[in-house]
Structures are given as structure tokens and as C-alpha cells.
Amino acid sequence: MPKWIGKFHHLQTLRACWELKNVPSTLKYMFNLRHLHIYSHTKLPAEIGRLTSLRTLPYFTVGKEKGFQIEELGSLKNLKGSLEIQDLEMVLDKEEAMKADIFQKLNLFDLAFTWSDGREDETNDESVLEGLQPHSNLKKLKISRFKGIRFPTWAEKMAVRDGPQGSWVPLDNLIEIKLIGCSEIEEIPRLEHLLNLKSLSLKGLKKVRLINECFNHLMSLEIKELDRLECLPEWLFLNNQNLSILEITNCGVLRELPDGLDTLNSLLLLYIRDCENLKSIGNPSGGARQSQGILRALIIENCRELVELPCEMLESWTSTIDEIVLEGLRSLKNLPMLIDCLAKSFTRLTYLKILGVPKLMAASIGSVESWDLSSLRALLIDVSVEWSIEDSVGIAETVERMLRGCCNSLASCNKLKRLPYVDALNHLTKLESIYISDCPELCIDSEWRNHHPHLEVEVDGQPI
């Protein structure tokens, strides 16, 4: 950006491109500028506080030198919308943080407070965050890489004090809270009074053991990298009828989920990954479910101790689910029963992936013949080393029966020695392509090499 941009004294809106790294120092002469659209990596010039007409400033990075300190925000009294304040470790204490005058900025509805990563020195994060108390109009709050042992009172209560000796006013306009990389705190803030809260993300809170808060109006809940999390509230699922997205990942100590997962009648996505000690996803509700679920995607990966996925839960989602991924579940015992439930009841299932689940081949041939997978467009299964007691003919017969109603692809069968008879293709009227990978023992006979011309067949990326 050229320095002469500062001569446009009447310009009100300026949008920086992604490639722009630095804004020239002459920006401070654009006294009528109202909207400055920049990216998080764009470095602002000194004395941005002189642009007192500014209303839009999405990012501000704190520096130590005069003209780059947090006090520059104090004179920007008309700021509105969203603001992320970065490198807050550059702020000395509460008193200096208060110079940003965040509390008086009534129209800042989306605030993010961010510290740098990799800090090892003694921190003053609690004091600084205390001085950044927002206005009660706040709708979205994000706190990243805060290293304090506990949040200041306003963040702990999720309420702000109306004046030095005033009463506490709840932040009940909040619809979204993200706490990311706050690795030293042991308890999350109080949330039960936030009736408008729709989205909660808890990531990298490595010392939190318990979540005792009640949040009954959530639509999205993400719990990630809570290394010491032992359990979730027993009532979590029974009271969250609006919850549509549930993600639980990298919680290595968590052993079970609460009962009633199938009562989440608004749930669209259930994603559980890398919870290596998770043994149970809870018991089905029995008669507690009020209506049929609307789940669209069920993804459970790398939960090696998970023993059972209740069929009753799957049955509550039969009419809507279109994607199922079960991967790395080496202890799952009831997979054949689950597949029976899937094939007999699921009318929308288009994507089925089962990898590293040893009990797949325990299904009887008679059972497999009854499976209706006619809606599938992608089938990925893994005949792994753990199934090597199955002879190649038995594996091939089971795979053939699974393929008869499938509409697209097959992958990852590393103990497969031969494909089904090519005549099986006559049943696959919708089949367009088959991709096979990681099958070192597979031999392709001449019949398959002369398959139907409309069918695309690839083995390890090479057409046959």
C-alpha cells in the first residue's frame, strides 16, 4: 500500500488484501476513516488511536512501544461489531488494560482476547483480563491461550459490574463462548444463567477434570483436548433438546458418556474421536425419547476401548442418517448386530466406512444376504490382519454379498486374496467405480481385467 494513501482524507472505507503485511504510517491522517478491514497478520502503524471516527477494526495487535500499546483503543469510542486483541502478554496489568476502555464500547458484540503461544515466563494474565471487562451487550466471547489459574470474577461469573460499586449484570446476551488453550484453569465459568447461549467450545483446557455446569439451550457443543476430563454431567443429554452438533475429541481419560444420547432429537452430527479410554457412549433412553431423531452423520474414530454401540440408538436415527464412520474400534463387540440394523432399516445411508473393527467378518453369510445397502454410494471396509483366521474365500463371499446392493466403492482389504466372481457385477446396476487399496495379496484374474466397459476399476491408483 503506497504512503500517499494518507492523502485521502475523506475516505471512509478501506479494505486490505490478504497479501498486505504492513499498513503505511500515513494511515493516521485519514481522519474520516470509519471502516478498516484488515487480516490478523496485517501490521498496523503507530497511533491508530488518532482515527477517532473508526467503527470497524477487526484486529489489533498490542506492542510495547508508544503508539502500539493497548491504550490506542481507548480513543476509538465508536468501534462496533467484532474485535480481536492479540498479544495481550504485552499489557502490564489491569490498569493498563483498562485504558482500552472496552467496557464503554457498547456496540462491540464480538470480542476475542488472545495471548501468544509458547510463553514460559511468569504471567499476569488474570490481572490483564480483569481490566478488559466487556459491556453486557456482548454476544460472542473468545479467550485464547490465557495462562491464569482462574478467570477474573467477571469471566468466572459471566457477568459484569455496572460501575465500581455497582451490581453484577449477567452477560445474558451471549450466544457463543470459546475457551481455547486456557491450559492452567481447573474449572470452566458459570454458564447456567446464560439462557441465550447456543454454541460452546472448550479446547485445550488441560487441567479441567469435571464439567458441572448446566447448559440446556446449546445447539453446538465441542469438547476437545481436555486431557484430564473424567466425566460429563449425568443430565447433559436429557436437558439439551436443541443440541444439533456434538463433538468430543482427544479426551484421553474420559471413560463413558452420560445416558440418553438418543434423546437428542435435534442432533445432526455426532463426532467422537481419539478418546482412547472411552468404554461406553451411555445407555439408550428406553421410553424417554419423545420423537424420532434426525441424525445425519455418526463418526466414531480411534476409541479402542469402546465395547458397544447400542442398536437402540441406531434405530432412533434410521430414517435420516446418511454417513457412518466406525474406525479404530478394536474392542467393539456388536458390530455384526449393528450392520444388521443398518442394512435392514437405513433408507438414506450413502457412506459407510468400517476400518480397524475386527468383528466385521463375524457376521453370518445368511445375515449378510439380508443386508440392503442399495442407497450406498461409498463403502470402505478393512479386512485387517486381525481377521486373518478367515480364509480368503469366506472373506470374498461376505464382501460379494455386501457389494450386491452397493452403488460405488470398496477400499482397504489387506487380507483379500481374490475378488468376487465378475458375475456379481450384474446385480450392481448403479455401480460406476471400484477403488481397491492396500491389498498386497490380491490377484486379479482375466475375467476382472475384461470387466464391463462402463465400470472404472482401480487397484492402488492404477486402472486394470
Image: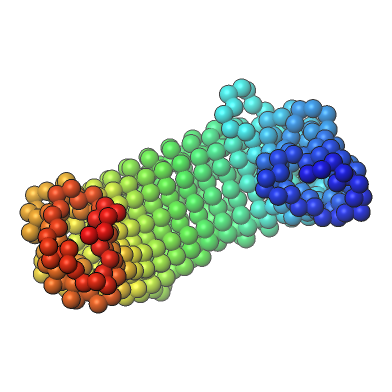
Q: Where is residue 147 in the image (x, y as percent from the top left)?
A: 59, 32
- Asked whether 109 or 302 is in front, the reply is 302
Does residue 164 appear anywhere in the picture? no
Where 343 falls versus 48 (above or below)?
below
Task: State the image coordinates of residue 181 (x, y, percent, origin top left).
Answer: 55, 38
On-image quarter of the N terminus: top right
**Up-down relation of residue 45 to residue 409 (above or below):** above
Q: Nearer the viewer, residue 316 or 422?
A: 422
At x 36%, y 64%, the residue is 323
410 horizontally vs 257: left or right: left
In percent of the image, x 61 and y 54: which residue is there? Answer: 176
Q: Name the residue: 43% across, 50% down.
A: 248
How far across and how far down the image is residue 449, in percent?
17, 63
Q: Is residue 395 above or below residue 421?
A: above
Quadrant position of residue 411: bottom left
Q: State left or right for residue 73 relative to residue 186.
A: right
Camera-side residue of 365 and 274: 365
